[in-house]
Image: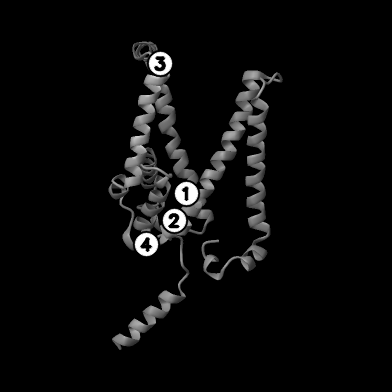
Amino acid sequence: MMMEDTEGQLVGDADAPVGSLTDVEVEREGFSLWKRLRSPRTLISFGIAFALVIFAFRGLDIDVSQTWQYMRDANPWLMLLGLVVFYTTFPMRALRWRMLLRNADVPIAKGHGSWASLPALMEYLYLSWFANCIVPAKLGDAYRAYLLKHNGKVSFSSAFGTIFAERLLDMIGLFGMLLVSGWIAFGTHMPEGTQIVFGFGALLVVAILAGLAGMRWLSPLIRRVLPARMHEFY
C-alpha cells in the first residue's frame, strides 16, 4: 500500500507542471527575507551603493554643510504633508490589489476577515516595499506573493500575476501623470530633448496595451505555441 502511494506520488510529481526557479524555491523552502538580506548579491549591492555615495561626495564636490542647510530650511509641514499623502496611498493600493485578485478568480471572499482583509493586504504591501528597499531585483514583490500564498493558500503564480498587472497599471498611470505635469509646466512649448522622453513613454504604453490585448485575444494561438507545462501559469 505504501509502495503504491509512493509510486502515485512520483507519477503526480512527474506530471505536475514545472514552475519557474522562483516558484520552485518558494514552494520548497519558503521566502526568508533575512536569508536574502545576507546573500552575497545583496551584500555586494550594499557595497556598490556605499561606494557610489562616497564617489558622489568626493568626486562631485558636494558641500555637506550647504546640503544640511537646505534640509534645515525645508518646510517641515510640507514634508509631513508629503509623508501623509504617501502613506494614504497604501489603502488605495490594497483595494486595487484586492480587485485584481478578485478578477483573477482568487477566492478572497473566504479571507475577508483574515488574510484578504484590507489591513492584512496593507501589511503585505508595507513589508514588500521595505524588502524592495533593502534587497535587489525587486524581490519584495516576490515576497508579497509568498506572504499571500503562505497566509491565504493562494498559488504563487496567481499572486505574482496580479502583482505584475499592478506594475503595468503603475507604468500607464505614471505616463498619464507625466503628460499632465508636462502640459501644466511647459504648455505647448516643450524644452528641447523632452520630446524623446514623451515619445519613449508613449511607445512603452502602446507596447504594454498591445501586449495585453494580444494575450487576451490571441490566447488560443499562444496556448498552442507555449509548452504544456506553461499553460497553468499563462
CA separation in Å, label 1 and label 4:
23 Å
Q: Which mark is residue 98?
A: 1
Question: Marks 3 and 1: which is nearer the front?
Answer: 3
The disc at residue 27 is 4
Q: Secondary structure at mark 2?
A: helix
Which comes sooner in the sequence, label 2 or label 1?
1
Label 1 CA crowd tier, 10 Å (few <14, some 14–19, many 20+)? many
Residue 14 appears in the figure: yes
Name the residue nearer the viewer: 215 or 105: 215
Please tell me the numbered disc located at residue 61. 3
The x, y position of residue 201, in whole percent, is 63, 35
Q: What is the spatial separation of the Cα atoms under label 2 and label 4, in whole angstroms?
A: 21 Å
* Amino acid type, callout 2: Ile
Q: Nearer the viewer, residue 98 or 219?
A: 219
Cα distance, mark 3 to mark 4? 49 Å
Image quarter in which the C terminus is found = bottom right
